Image: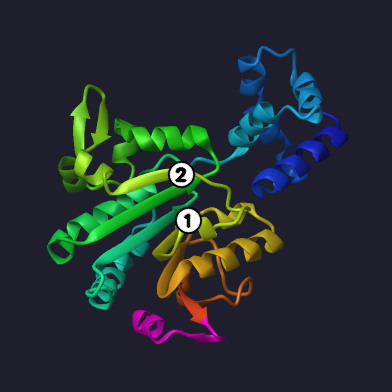
Amino acid sequence: MTPDDFTFVARLLKERSGLILTKDKSYLLENRLMPVVRARMLKNLDELIERLRGGQIDLTETVVDAMLSKDTGFFRDWRPFQHLRDVVLPNLHAARLGKRHIRVLCAGASTGQEVYSLAMQITEAAESFSGWQVQALGVDISREALTAAEQGVYNQFEVQHGLPIRALLRHFNKEQDSWRINEGLRRMVSFRPWNLLDDLYPLGRFDIVLCRNVLAYFDQQTKLAVLQKLSRLLFEDGVLYVGINETVTGVSSSFTPVIPEHGIYAVHRDGHPDSRSLAIAS
């Protein structure tokens, strides 16, 4: 691949997905695009790039999808989920008794493990939330990943990766060598294809947003734009969870840190932390 071709593909990826691909990752580009070359029965990467330059939309979508990281898992990095269970859900229960409705968003849902983990946490608090309307929405730019998420079927390795045995037995049904999310949990969760670079307003408002291990792939300007959009989706006492190796501090003034080492942030309003956010922080 020539330097000019690499620059073209890197620019295409950034424009379509926000993904930043540096020159030292050229090997990654070739490794992930060769399966596309074979699937499309093309001669080589050169022919693939030639067609991309020609503006083939379906091929562009396939290439972007191939380059996205789909690394995820159930209850990945346990501490944020512990905070959700012990602090955020009780606070929201007290604050939402009037409307008895909670909405949560998983931005960058990939194959669904994270949003299902979130739904499990809420289900575990079933006594508190009995009779409530709970909606969990997972969005991702990758249609391939969302297809897997909607099916809700995971192999033995995937369910052993972070999922407590009690949760496995309660929320899954065994199907030969795989495990399927049960219908009760599945009804709580929906998925939509969505690009975080696009307007997020049509998704509605949320009490909790997870955008974990997504910002790390963006440049500073894109991080800021996405965080500003997410802040507008959250209610004033809303909480944002990002990856434990990601930070919002110094990127956006839309959030105030709660437990930044675990990627937990509350919403800023009018330049000051909301009082309920401070209660969460304590």
Question: What are the residue bounds of the magenta stretch?
Answer: 269-282
Residue type at mark 1 is Leu
Q: Residues within 10 Å of mark 2 (few under 14, many from 20)?
A: some
* Residue 73 visible in the current orientation: no
Location of residue 164 in the rendering, given as x and y in whole percent from the top left corner: 23, 48
Q: Decide which of 171, 94 is in the foreground and name it.
A: 94
Q: Residues within 10 Å of mark 1 (few under 14, many from 20)?
A: few
**Rendering quarter of residue 222:** bottom right
Asked whether disc 2 touches disc 1, contact meaning CB atoms under 8 Å apart, the reply is: yes
At 27% across and 73% down in the image, what residue appears? 96
- What residue is pinned by disc 2? 192
- What residue is pinned by disc 1? 203
Residue type at mark 2 is Arg
Query: Does the magenta segment cover residue 276?
Result: yes
**Rendering quarter of residue 118:** bottom left
Location of residue 279 in the rendering, given as x and y in whole percent from the top left corner: 34, 84
